[in-house]
Image (tube, helix red, strand yellow):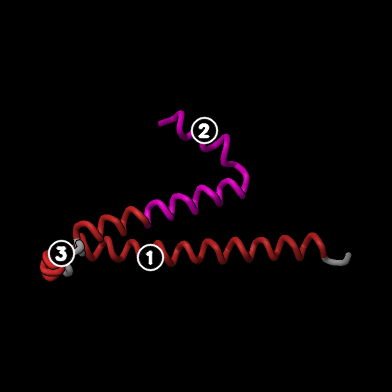
């Protein structure tokens, strides 16, 4: 575990790498949660529809649905922050002095 932490500290110490790591982790976590929800809470087919009547209100399915929704909102906020940072950097570096 310490080898992994040392690797992350040494290779992701600039903002662009950190941004890429955060976006990638957010996408991976969102995708995993959606797959979990689709497999166990809302599977395909007629029997999946019948199973959804039972699982729709379960705490695990509610949690998975809430997590994937909040990760989507988080992902949008990350990109808005990155865009704002880029525009601010451009304005600060290219304004008339």
Task: State the quadrant of the C terminus.
Answer: bottom right
Q: Residue at x 25, y 62 (%)?
A: 63
Q: Which residues are magenta?
A: 1-30
x, y percent for residue 59: 18, 63
Quarter of the view holding residue 2: top left
What is the magenta segment's predominant secondary structure? helix
- Disc 3 marks which residue? 48
| Residue 13 sits inside the magenta stretch | yes
- Disc 1 marks which residue? 70
Residue most toward the front?
45
Secondary element at tag 3:
helix
Q: Which comes sooner in the sequence, label 2 or label 3?
A: 2
Task: State the quadrant of the N terminus.
Answer: top left
x, y percent for residue 83: 62, 64
- Disc 2 marks which residue? 7
| Residue 2 sits inside the magenta stretch | yes
Q: Which comes sooner in the sequence, label 3 or label 1?
A: 3
* Mark 2–mark 1 CB contact (< 8 Å): no
């Amino acid at each position: 575990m310490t080898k992994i932490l040392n690797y992350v500290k040494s290779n992701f110490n600039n903002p662009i790498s950190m941004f890429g790591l955060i976006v990638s982790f957010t996408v991976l976590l969102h995708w995993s949660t959606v797959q979990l929800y689709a497999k166990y809470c809302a599977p395909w087919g007629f029997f999946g529809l019948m199973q959804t009547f039972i699982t729709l209100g379960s705490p695990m399915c509610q949690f998975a649905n809430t997590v994937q929704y909040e990760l989507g909102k988080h992902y949008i906020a990350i990109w808005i922050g990155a865009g704002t940072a880029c525009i601010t950097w451009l304005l600060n570096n290219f304004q008339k002095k």
